[in-house]
Amino acid sequence: MWNELLALRAVPGQVLRVSIPDGRVSTLVEDAGPFPDGLIVESGTVCWTTMGAPETDPAKGRSEAALDFSARNGGVHAVSLDGSGRRDVVPAGSVTTGKQLASDGRGTLYWGDREGCRVSRARTDGTGLTDLVVNDPGEGIAAQCVGVAVDPARGHLYWTQKGPAKGGKGRIFRAGLDLPPGESAERRSDVELLWDGLPEPIDLDVHEGRLYWTDRGAPPGGNTLNRAPLPPSGRTGDAPEILASGFAEAIGLALDAGAGVAYVSDLGGHVRAVPLPGGPASGEGEREIAALPFPVNGITGL
């Protein structure tokens, strides 16, 4: 059972510590870089992605749509749990727009690269940088990869392509953790489309034969926490079960399987605890862990 969460402040970029019992917040990393987004703890090391410094379009005002993240200046970064030893996991320029981050629990990180239209991986020491999925950027926002989860026991990689904002064209895919022999990341024969027509799926997690995900799209299906059974090969997924709703642009997901609780962060600055049906905390109600005066992106547990 977790006692603490780590969470990302988007602007200015920071890694925060959030106490689960009382919601107290402290800062682990004061300068996490421009627009941090995905966060995980792997082998005692805190790792996070950054989207990079965007170009701005004054004609679009101060909205999210005014930010252009197409420059290849995102990254993957790491620091010790005590805040020391800050380093870049991959060299500068290796990532366009670092989004959600996952690990296999064996020293390898996986992340979505949104404007890069790809899913990539590398070991925490920076070796083994590999693209696993590369979509055609000519397809525009429909090709952009965001959320990532891995299931090492079954050898599967899952990712979201959220589509346009509030567009109802979000998709979730599955493929092997490794490229099929002789195939490239651009042309894989093992990619399966599991869910289509979702509002705007973002972050993912896998537990006991189910896929969990946040969705920041339009209600009633969006701004929700969802789960559904993992379908067998060759079949699409069943309609998701909505576990919680009413988020303010749901983003981060952290699943404390032992406690039976999912933690969800949103761009409204909220971090909520959602008891999972049938789990140890199923008799408890949802509760707000923290309400912060700035957007919160990725979260993970300690």
Image: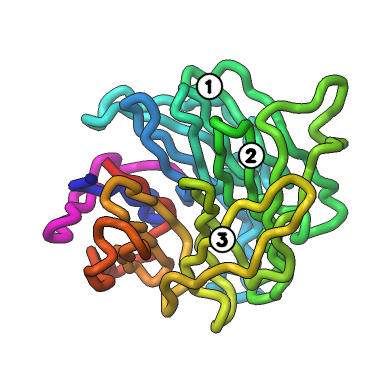
Residue found 63% across the figure and 56% down from its top? 55
Q: Residue furthest bottom?
A: 220
* Image quarter hosting the N terminus: top left
Rounded to the nearest angstrom, the CA distance separating label 3 from label 2 is 16 Å
Say which of marks 3 and 2 sits in front.
3
Residue found 22% across the figure and 52% down from its top? 18
Taking the image as shown, residue 78 lies to the left or right of residue 30, namely right
Residue at image mark 2? 157
Residue 285: give x, y in percent of width and height.
Answer: 25, 73
Q: Which mark is residue 228?
A: 3
The image quarter containing residue 157 is top right
What's the amino acid at mark 3? Ala
Say which of marks 1 and 3 sits in front.
3
Q: How many dots with numbers? A: 3
Residue found 65% across the figure and 58% down from its top? 68
The mark nearer the N terminus, 1 or 2, is 1
Query: Magenta segment, which residues?
Result: 16-34
